[in-house]
Amino acid sequence: MVLPAVPPEAPIPRTSTTRAPAPAGPEDSEDYRHRLQAGVWGWIHRSPWCVWVEPIGEGASIWDRRWSEAVEAALARWQELLAIERVNDPAAAQIQVLRRRPPLRLLEGEQRASHGRAELLGARWVRRNGAWQLEPRLQVLLSPNQRQLGIEATALHELGHAFGLWGHSDQPADVMAAVPGAKPVLEIGPRDRATLRWLQQQPSVFAPGSGGPALQPPTGNQGEQEAQQLHDHHAGAGGKVEER
């Protein structure tokens, strides 16, 4: 059960070290940890991940069904490596996956379109199983206007960002390659897996016991107050956005 977030008068502190990149490594290394970048909340990982996928409903078009099948296939791939719980309530999810094309973004003076986008919206305190947890809030937008294999490859990539891989590989065979190749990448390769393993060993404020900063959870009857958003860090104010 998801209960209210901490009131805004109890902000979550951030440290000046959370933007530090991963240690540099050789270009031919077995992973690409040196290409990852921590954000305002530091490294992001947790277990389990609660994921909500926008349902297609009865009478859905063939295009929507293909979108749903592609997203399910991508999630199944990541579920081989991560603990993922599917939830029916979007408010209970740390990651929401939406069936829509990302809005155009202005980059270097030009409007740029993309088929997928992952965005870190912020963080909130949530009470689960009787204990408070600090959880990230992420959104993944996936356009249905691609071939099914293209949607699946885009979903694999953007979900990788949402699961904490904030950066890109320079190898086209990796799921997290910066630029998609002519053939969709539909398997999570050895370098992707090694980078994910490295990430999961880093201290994270969202993973108790990982060595991340110890933040103070809510006290008293704060959990019974009306739900409200906390510390909503949108991309323009320090959140992270990755797209393809």
Image (cartoon, helix red, strand yellow):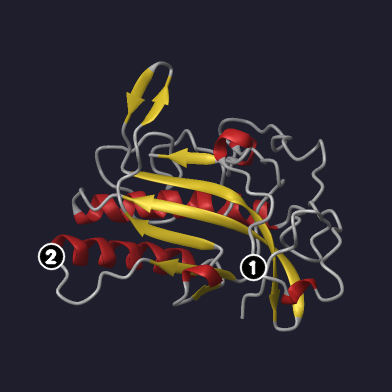
Q: Is residue 56 left or right of residue 190?
A: left
Q: Is mark 2 on a helix, strand or loop?
A: helix
Q: In this view, does 42 lie to the left or right of 166?
A: right
Residue 58: which quarter of the image? Answer: bottom left
Residue 225: which quarter of the image? Answer: bottom right
Q: Report the number of discs.
A: 2
* Pointer 1 or 2: first along the chain: 2
Q: Residue at x 38, y 51 (%)?
A: 141
What amino acid is labelled 1 in the image?
Ala
Which residue matches tag 1? 227
Which residue matches tag 2? 62
- Residue 68: x %, y % from top left: 27, 66
Q: Is residue 175 above or below residue 209?
A: above
Q: In this view, does 220 lie above or below 147?
A: below
- Residue 191: x %, y % from top left: 52, 48
Q: Residue at x 50, y 38 (%)?
A: 168
Q: Can residue 152 be seen in this view?
A: yes
For the residues labelled 1 and 2, the Cα–Cα distance comes to 38 Å
- Residue 165: x %, y % from top left: 56, 48
The residue closer to the viewer here, 144 or 34, is 144
Q: Which residue is drawn at 69% across and 48% down?
A: 43
Residue at the limit of the structure toward the top, as seen here = 109
Q: Can residue 192 be seen in this view?
A: no
